[in-house]
Amino acid sequence: MSCFSCVESAPPVAIFALSKAYREDPHPKKVDLGIGAYRTNEAKPWVLPVVRKAEEAISKDETLNHEYLGQLGMESFTQLATRMLLGEDSPAVQEQRAFGVQSLSGTGALRIGSEFLRKCVGFKTVYVSKPSWLCLRSANHHLVLKNAGFTDVRTFRYWDGKNRCLDFDGMLEDLAQAPKDSVIILHVCAHNPTGVDPTIEQWEKIANVIEKKHLFPFFDCAYQGFASGDLVKDSYSVRYFVSRGFEFLCAQSFAKNFGLYCQRIGNLTFVAKNADVLTNVKAQMALIVRGNYSNPPAHGARIVSHVLSDSQLNQEWHDCIKLMSGRIIQMRKALRDKLEELKTPGDWSHITSQIGMFSYTGLTPNHVRHLVDDYHIYLPNDGRISICGLNTNNVEYVAQAFNDVVSKYPDNE
């Protein structure tokens, strides 16, 4: 008998199983609204032109080699990524009490950051929004946090399903009841999966509760620049927390805003009250990285560093993220306009009030089942759609399908 006979089965990762089903479907009108990756209006993946230029320049640099990076990663990259997040004039940057650790994209930053908070700082309880990334069978935040050592993973209310908006009162109430020294996972912008973000005034109230209750913020930043097209606007929450004097961690991903999905390039930013503590923090982070994957890869970090350090390429990159975010905003409007033109039952204003890659449509699992089975439109059971899957060639078809299932099955939950 094999020693592996005791291994139990596990369900497939739902979002990738959904993507596989889409790829294998021969239907000519099939639509993929599941996977969170940018697509052109022709439904094709897009390599940013500025990334092509950076890769070409890097390939011609004969001084580069394939030696190991250190545990904390490429310093030029982590410095530029941290400044991009916090701003060049940030007090944390100017006072040298902020630094970054290169990670395996945003997921890796969450993983090593969570392990640090649990094992080195001693935090025991962590809260994530309900719902949170990815809201399919098992939210990935929960999986990452538990694998990092947190056994007490709780949720705070976030989505008001009835009104299709932020449940702000419920959120504040749950945070106010959290035990002292709980870690709170907060999305910097373009909340996944709802696309609903707090307002400036609401961020102030959230900060007040976190300060009063002595909670620790851990930000997840997957969409800076990709949400609105404005790097500063999309990083408002973390910059505001710096201005209030908070210590925090922030997991940054460059998968979306640079289109570097498979390069797994991320940064874990630390912001401390003073620089004196950072030597020990860096030493512990080096050990955590060493025990997980030894050291990070160089190619994606070189691309990002090359672009961010070159003023002309940096401007070209800004133009790219404005183009991507602009197309998403246009598709939100197109979907809402068509649903309202069809007089689809319900209020669809949330489609355009939400922001970023995803929209929490309010469609029920029963609606989703009929969309997949009858219309070959693929999306998760929670009704979350990737707006990137919409284009001028399919948005009318998608809207008509939404209208059909909502009209036929209005009371099914």
Image: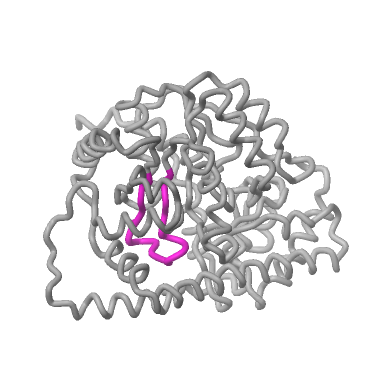
Indicate left or right for 67 with 406 as reference: left
> Residue at 60% of width from left, 74% of height from top?
28
Q: Vertically, is 285 above or below 226?
A: above
In the picture, residue 373 is in which quadrant? bottom right
Q: Position of residue 108 (x, y in %)?
A: 35, 46
* Front one among 360 and 367: 360
Q: Is residue 20 above or below residue 161?
A: below
The answer to whether residue 137 of the structure is visible from this angle is: no
Q: Quadrant of the C terminus?
A: top right
**Residue visible at 56% across and 43% down?**
135
Task: Please indicate whether residue 254 sits to the left or right of residue 211 in the image.
Answer: left
Asked if the stretch drawn in magenta spans residue 335, the answer is no
Q: How is the image coloured?
A: one colour
Residues in magenta?
A: 250-269
Rendered position, 150 above or below 87: above
The foreground one among 239 and 61 is 239
Residue 150 locus on image (x, y percent): 40, 26
Between 344 and 253, the residue placed more toward the observer is: 253
Q: Which residue occupies 58% across, 66% down?
A: 389
The reply to whether the magenta stretch includes residue 259 is yes
Q: Is residue 294 above or below residue 408?
A: above
| Residue 219 screen position, x and y as percent | 48, 42
Give the percent coordinates (x, y) of residue 54. Answer: 31, 76
